[in-house]
Image (spheres, helix red, strand yellow):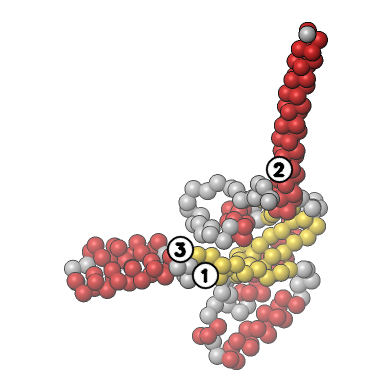
Amino acid sequence: MLMPIIMLILAGFSYVILLLYKKNRIKFSKKQVKDDNLITVQKFINVKDIRKNFLYTRDNKIFTYIRIYPIDVHLLSKREQESKTNILTKEISVIQKPFKFLAVSKPTDISSLIGEYQEILITSIDQKQKEILRKEMLAVSDFATTGEAMERLFYVVLWDEYEEEIESEIIKVANDFISAYNTIGVKSEILKEREIYGLCNLVNNPGYSNEDIEEIFTPSIPILKEVI
């Protein structure tokens, strides 16, 4: 009788050990898959560092960005539009560097407009004016919450293979672009470190709208941690 009991006990222990082994193996496999997914997404983001006016990538490239402040071409005559187009084409054609044009949408920040209306509402003694202001504030708020209040931001993107002291060469090319846009009366500027972070957030997160450089800022780029 003793021998069968011992065999049963050993079989029970073996079964428990087998279950624990399988459970730990499943956990390890899931963790490995999650880690592999995380590595894959980080490679997809491809951002190594952002410093001053430059974004450095993991595949040894360097980027800089120029923001272009658009003008309303509908205020120009057909001749003026053609003239500006021809001048800009001529100025940019002499720049022998690759570039691309980037346009992104951003929710319009109406907080300053609402604040201005509220100040007028508090100080005004004209009841008719107050009524109009309240209706306008409500209309503007509704317009923003429906997602229709969007603004387009425009950028010229420059890049090159990274090597020592390449930054000064890219800045020179960026200034050539700025000079070209200045000839047709269009304002442009090279993005600084904080603004590049903002652009990265805007591209990866369409709901991102905080571009006020006076607000508290934490450099971060949202990334996906797990791919399903």
Nearer to us of marks 2 and 3 is: 2
* Mark pair 1, 2: CA separation: 37 Å
In the drawing, does residue 220 fall left or right of residue 7? Answer: left
* Mark pair 1, 3: CA separation: 9 Å
* Residue 43 location (% of width, % of height): 75, 50
On the image, numbered disc 2 is attached to which residue? 34
Residue in the picture at 58% in, 77% down: 185
Disc number placed over residue 50 in the picture, else none: none
Q: Quadrant of the N terminus?
A: top right
On the image, numbered disc 1 is attached to which residue? 151
Does label 2 or label 3 sit earlier along the sequence? Answer: 2
* Residue 165 location (% of width, % of height): 77, 53
Does residue 11 appear anywhere in the picture? yes
What amino acid does circle 3 point to? Answer: Asp
Whether the residues at callouts 1 and 2 have beta carbons within 8 Å, the answer is: no
Seen from this angle, which residue lies furthest front?
A: 1
Residue in the picture at 47% in, 51% down: 215
Query: Which type of secondary structure does the marked residue at label 2 adopt?
Result: helix
Query: Which type of secondary structure does the marked residue at label 1 adopt?
Result: strand
Res 197 → quadrant: bottom right
In the drawing, does residue 84 fall left or right of residue 151? Answer: right
Numbered circles on residues, count:
3
Seen from this angle, which residue lies furthest top?
A: 2
Query: Which type of secondary structure does the marked residue at label 3 adopt?
Result: loop
Does label 1 or label 3 sit earlier along the sequence? Answer: 3
Against 141, is 27 above or below? above
* Residue 28 location (% of width, % of height): 74, 35
Residue in the picture at 73% in, 53% down: 44
* Mark pair 2, 3: CA separation: 37 Å
What amino acid does circle 2 point to? Answer: Lys
On the image, numbered disc 3 is attached to which residue? 109
Other residues around mark 1 within 10 Å, as few (<14) / some (14–19) / many (≥20): few
